[in-house]
Image (cartoon, grey):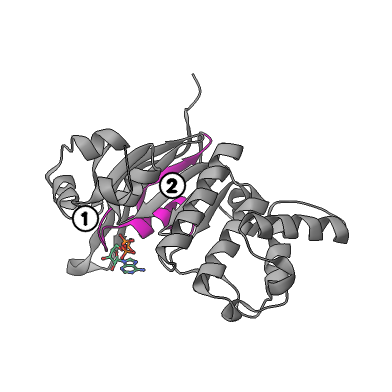
Amino acid sequence: MGNEYVLEGVDLTRYFGIGRLRFAAVDHVTIGFREGEIVSIVGESGSGKTTLAKIFLGLLRPSSGEVRYRGEVLRLRGQRERRAYWSGVQAIFQDPFASFNQFFRVDRFLQDCLKVAGIQASEQEARRIKEEACSFVNLPYHEIYNKYPFELSGGQMQRLMIARVFIIKPSVLIADEPTSMIDACSRSTILDMLLSLRKERGMTIVFITHDLGLAYYVSDRIAIMHRGKICEEGEAKRVIEDPQHEYTRSLLADVPRLMAEWSLE
Ligand SMILES: Nc1ncnc2c1ncn2[C@@H]1O[C@H](COP(=O)(O)OP(=O)(O)OP(=O)(O)O)[C@@H](O)[C@H]1O
């Protein structure tokens, strides 16, 4: 039988610091993501979520354990292998400002996405794809193509990151607090965009958030991370309605209006 996970981490550990200061930011984490599934990794600040995301993206080496993509152990030896991997596994990071090369205009950024996606298109066809991606995220291409990232708002940058995903069509998207810089209204629009991408493309989405309400709203499964470990994992409804771990219960106590806020059921 084949491996059912598109992406998985097996016994991942990552230490930081040396000597007595050494600690495990990610501590023996095993977790897998199936095709078309949305899994949220929820935990408070410093619990190791971003470190785990970076390991999955091949941006950080685990101290031990391994990442498997489509059943194969991930070994990224050069820029070519990295690029090939990133055409399948993409990320949206917390701080969109840091995700852009500030010296490149928006058009160059989008053009690079075509390159990562391996799309060889005429100038006219490339323009059509870029316009289509911008319109998917409600950005008027003709107004922004000539701008530098610092001339965009935080929300526009985040939309541009989703336009990138729209062009590259990765199998897996790792979204680290994708809605942190925008107001509640644009937030739900962006979430809807991501949900429709998963529906249309069967994309796997890994949401990294401290917001259990948001996780419940979007996910099939939730994994709770605490001090580098996954302390609880399961179907979203089960984790919320019947939490098994003390830490999950304490997180739930912090979101008493969870159901009402997200108008669930
Ligand atoms: N490069 C690094 N060097 C040393 N320590 C680090 C490094 N990156 C992260 N850490 C530490 O590892 C721990 C986990 O950090 P991480 O960013 O993964 O947490 P997080 O759950 O994503 O938090 P947040 O929600 O605030 O982003 C923290 O104590 C952090 O200070």
Where is mark 2, residue-wise? 206
Q: Is residue 166 magenta?
A: no
Position above or below: 73 against 96: above
Is residue 59 at least partly visible in the picture? Answer: yes
Amino acid type, label 1: Arg
Identity of the residue furthest to the left in this view: 246
Please rate how many residues cluster around mark 1, counting C-alpha atoms within 10 Å: few if below 14, some from 14 to 19, many from 20.
Answer: some
Asked if ligand 1 lies within 8 A of label 1, the reply is no
Number of numbered tags placed on the structure image: 2
Image spot of residue 132 (x, y percent): 72, 55
The quarter holding residue 242 reads top left
Asked if ligand 1 lies within 8 A of label 2, the reply is no
Stretch in magenta: 42-70
- Work out how far the residue at label 2 is from the one at label 1, CA to CA, in angstroms: 19 Å
67 displayed left or right of 157: left
Amino acid type, label 2: Val
Q: Is residue 69 magenta?
A: yes
- Element under label 2? strand
Q: Going 57% across and 80% down the picture, which residue do you hit? A: 150
Give the mark toward the camera: 2 or 1: 2
Position above or below: 136 against 248: below
- Element under label 1? loop
The quarter holding residue 50 reads bottom left
Mark number displayed over residue 12: none
Location of ligand 1 given as a quarter of the image:
bottom left
Is residue 75 at least partly visible in the picture? Answer: no
213 displayed left or right of 62: left
Q: Going 43% across and 38% down the picture, which residue do you hit? A: 33
Identity of the residue furthest to the top in this view: 1
Where is mark 1, residue-wise? 227
